[in-house]
Image (cartoon, rainbow, N blue to C red):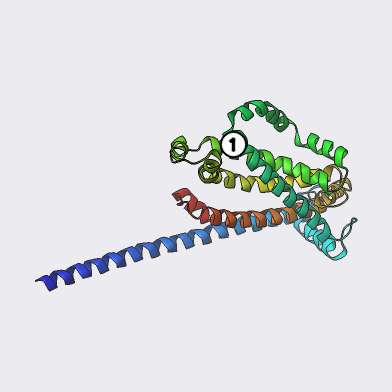
Amino acid sequence: MTIEMETTMSHELSDGRNEESAIAAAARARLRARKILVHSTQIAILVLGLGIWEIGSRTGLIDPFFFGSPFGIVLRLADWFVNGTAYGSFWDQVWITLEESLLGFVFGVASGVIVGILLGEVPFLADVFGPYIKIVNALPRIVLGSIFVIWLGLGLPSKVLLAAVLVFFVVFFNAFQGVRSVDRNLVANARILGASRLQVVQHVVIPSAMTWIIASLHVALGFSIIGAIVGEFLGAQGGLGLVIATSQNTFDASGVFGAMLVLGVIALGAEALMSQLERRLLAWRPKSPSENNVAGL
């Protein structure tokens, strides 16, 4: 009797495992099917849009002088990659913009995190400097860019500073809010156990606010590119912003769209790298259903 019961239980456990495996396999199959559907739809929309654009420009429904054409954009990019721009190699222009964006991103993130945590932890400093931060944040970025060009000239520093300022505010507000949202019970328990204020910040506050900080990096990365481009547009010796400004001044619509396409590719690549970094840094955090859906995109 005992052997029969053990055999029955073993079969039931095996059936349960098989059922769980079948459910997991079905879920993975649905996820793969959804990915294929999403990517196929994205490609179809892109092809349809480009096709309508090209046909419209060839038939005269769309004026290629003002709106360019996909084929004209390809020709312009091919010319830039082969023969370069009026300011030198096209790759050099891309690297200038990347360098300005990356430096602005690093400085902006570092200063935003430090100031956000400091003001979030010290209410007195938040009350003192809060109005000044709001005033600077309210200033139009193009005005700040003009001021930085006057102060620092047409070289790299003015573009880096503008990109860093744009990144700073995005990261600062998230870091500040992340610190303010930390569970005060955790802080109190750490203090009761004898932790100093610095240890509380290091081991409780910063890890708790890390989700807020990392979430801001996606937006901050885009703002660093915007800052570099705006700075180059206002005045520069090189960079994609200068290429766009020159194309605009010569009514070269294909050149404007071509440079924008390159920027879009750079932004998508940077976003993919940032997503990988986020997954590594937040590997300890359980995923919500909504995040699982986003991850499938």
Residue lying farthest left? Answer: 1
Per the image, label 1 sits on a secondary structure element best described as helix
Q: Residue at x 88, y 64 (%)?
A: 83
User: Which quadrant of the structure image shows residue 55?
Assistant: bottom right
Residue at figure coordinates x 61%, y 34% from the top left: 119
Residue at screen point 78% across, 49% down: 67
Displayed quadrant of residue 71: bottom right
Closer-to-camera residue (140/209): 209
Seen in the picture, residue 55 relative to 4 is either above or below; the reply is: above
Q: For the N terminus, which image quadrant?
A: bottom left
Could you tell me residue 270's position as x and y percent?
Answer: 66, 55
- Residue for point 57% across, 59% down: 39
Looking at the picture, which amino acid does disc 1 mark? Phe
The one nearer the camera, 122 or 295, is 122
Determine which residue is flagged by label 1: 176
Residue 157 percent across, percent down from the top left = 82, 46
Q: Give the quarter of the figure containing the C terminus.
A: bottom right
